[in-house]
Image (cartoon, rainbow, N blue to C red):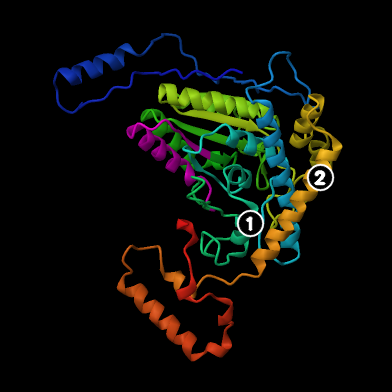
Amino acid sequence: MRILVARRCQPNIRGPTAVINANARRYVSDLRASRSYTNELEIKREESNIPCYRVLDEQGRIIKDGNEGKAPLELKKEMYKCMSKLTVMDKIFYDAQRQGRISFHMQHTGEQAALIASAAALDMGDVVYTQYREAGVYMWRGFDLQQMAHQCYGNIYDYGKGRQMPIHYGSRASNVHTVSSPLGTQIPHASGAAYALKMEGKPNVSMAYFGDGAASEGDFHAALNFAATLKAPALFFCRNNGYAISTPTSEQYIGDGIVCRAPGYGMHGVRVDGNDFLAVHEVVSEARSLALAENAPVLIEAMTYRVGHHSTSDDSTAYRSKEEMDDWAQNDDPLTRARVHLEMLGEWDSDQEAEMLTAYRKECIKCLQKAVGQKMPPIEQLFTDVYDDVPWHLEEQQANLMGHLDKYSTEYKLDEYANPDDYTDWRYQ
């Protein structure tokens, strides 16, 4: 594994420059000294081909004897189990959406290793920001299937009080901020959180997850520049899965992917095989240690593939072939690679596999059945949590709404909503 070393093009000079004084003269002198000059005119286009670190090959075999990553045996098994649980949840929740039981879902097929293994390399004190295809990260950090089911139904046990669309999870207990649909908005937040952690002297990093499409947003560039100039211990984890919805990466950029942008911001960077759970875990572990040791951000590009549709609102066969999807699913499946590795170690077999999958299916179905029978949050909750003290115009709107509902109560299914006197704000439990 090779982490690109950040090289600074000019010194990080601070201090007033508007006033002509010793500091200003030293500033200008240092700027001049940092440059190199030539009398040969050459307009360059630097070529880059950053290698992709891996431990396992596509068949789940160790590539180099003695290099099996940093994950101990029990952690390997726990990562594989969590990857399998995520896969089972994906299938059942997807089917539930197709049956009209929930309104929306996003699958993670093909990206399970990138999510679970990266989360396993973090500390619970690390602050995590996700995009929307990171249910596995929540799962690893303790956000269970029942909480996911409650959120997708938006019932009284949903931490978001039914205000968010399905799969927009958030958990204070898991130290993962709530999903926000607009691309890239979470990336600058991670830079700020990392800077705050440094200023508070805490031994933790922030982690921002995002896709290759989000790396085309302005927020991505602003976030990296902030983190680099502020020397913030932030990890930026890009899931390069080949597509930004229907736009392939070949139409998103001409350069060498995403990680090649790290040197431009004076950052460290590393590319990893996102379908290799051992490599992902090792890379994130090393990047986290580096970020803390040097108070420096690290950009990680995990090369993977989105086997499923972008979401339940998408039909990806309109812009890619079924043969392409099948080839990835059959020849570079992250679960197969992890399972074969454990089988070669003598730590997994078909009986364990069948027992595990049966248990996860039963648990998932039970969670959905429990979630569907719950009431919705009280209508009054529509007006809370935006302001500390509710302003007059919201009080007026609430009074108008409640008056309308009282007058036309027979026109609405008000019995489906919980009584405010019986409601518990579960976010604080």
Between residue 72 and residue 336, name the one nearer to us: 72
- Disc 1 secondary structure class: helix
Percent across and percent down for residue 308 are: 74, 47
- Disc 2 secondary structure class: helix
Question: Mark 1 or mark 2: which is in front?
Answer: 2
Could you tell me if residue 15 is visible in this image?
yes
The answer to whether 308 appears left or right of 289 in the picture is right
Name the residue at 65% across, 48% down: 245
Q: What span is in magenta?
A: 181-208
> Which residue, given by chain and number where applicable, does mark 2 sit on?
355
Dividing the image into 4 quarters, which one contains the N terminus?
top right
Q: Is residue 326 above or below residue 89?
A: above
Between residue 232 and residue 429, name the one nearer to us: 429
Name the residue at 68% across, 36% down: 78
Whole-number angstrom distance, CA of label 1 to CA of label 2: 20 Å
Disc 1 marks which amino acid?
Answer: Gln
Between residue 69 and residue 334, name the one nearer to us: 69
The answer to whether 206 appears left or right of 319 in the picture is left
Q: Residues within 10 Å of mark 2 (few under 14, many from 20)?
A: few
Q: How crowded is mark 1: few (under 14 residues within 10 Å), some or many (20 or more)?
A: many
